[in-house]
Amino acid sequence: MAFCLRRWSLQQDATSDPSLTVRLRALSGPGIVLYPVTATFAFVDWVMSIEPKWYSTMFPVIVLIGQIVIALAFVTLLLAWLREQPPFRPVVTRAHFHDLGNLLLAFVVFWTYVTFSQLLIIYSGNLPHEIDWYLHRVAGGWKGVIGLLALFHFFVPFFLLLFRVMKQNVVRLGIIAGLIFAAHMVEVYWTIEPTFFPHGVHVHWLDAAALLGLGGAWLTVFASNLSRHPLLPRNDPRIEYPVTQLAHAQ
């Protein structure tokens, strides 16, 4: 899906063919359904299966919303970094960062809602095959990790992003986005590691190697694709004015 969407988007930039817009929409609509379905199979196979007696219908939703949160945080950091470079300088305004801040706030709240909903349902049911998953994650040093996640994955970003001045200030919003990004990486670690080390935090050099290896490979491909083509749309048939006039009103 990503390959096709990118390829057709670049073709649209080159040709301004309106039929490509129809093609993009035709794939994106079903894709909204296809991606969560296939991702659910992946999350169950890769993560939930490490504790085969535990299950939760909310778990794939938590992972999917987490992906949206970390993607928005990454995009915010990237735009904050590139805002003073062409072609973004004449286009990007505080209103764009305000919009990104609103999206971050919405999905941070949504992620917290679905995460707490899973906890509340399992806590209320109090069934042995369900509570084991949480018991592994509240023992020993893992309690401190939960406190950090509650503080930096919800409370701090939530209260800061309520203020317009925080969302329109590029530096402050970038710091908040970086905080959310780092907190979510810790959340992924907390989701998996307690299965193997239920009595407390355990850090191994392979943890960092996996993050740097997989993350580095992805960033290399991402940066390579980023530098090959213009970062702003060209010849978009829906736009009848220059790209430099696309900025929101101050």
Image (cartoon, grey):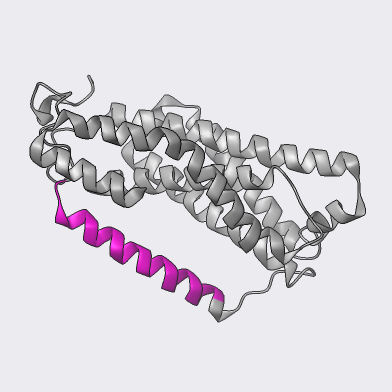
**Depth check: 147 or 68 in front?**
68
Is residue 11 shown left or right of residue 33? left
Among the 4 quarters of the image, the one containing residue 92:
top left
Indicate whether residue 218 is drawn in magenta: yes
The quarter of the image holding the C terminus is top left
Is residue 83 visible in the rendered structure shown here? no
User: Is 181 rendered above or below residue 247?
Assistant: below
- Residue at horizontal 38 percent and vertical 36 percent from the top: 28
Residue 96 lies in the magenta stretch: no
Residue closest to the far bottom: 205
Please give left or right for residue 144 compared with residue 230 in the image: right
In the rendered structure, the answer to whether residue 163 lies left or right of residue 43 reads left
Residue 56 lies, in percent from the top left, at 74, 47
Q: Out of 84 and 197, give the one closest to the viewer.
A: 197
Q: The magenta stretch spans which residues?
A: 207-230
User: Residue visible at 29% across and 44% down?
Assistant: 5
Q: Residue at x 54, y 50 (%)?
A: 38
Residue 1 lies, in percent from the top left, at 37, 48
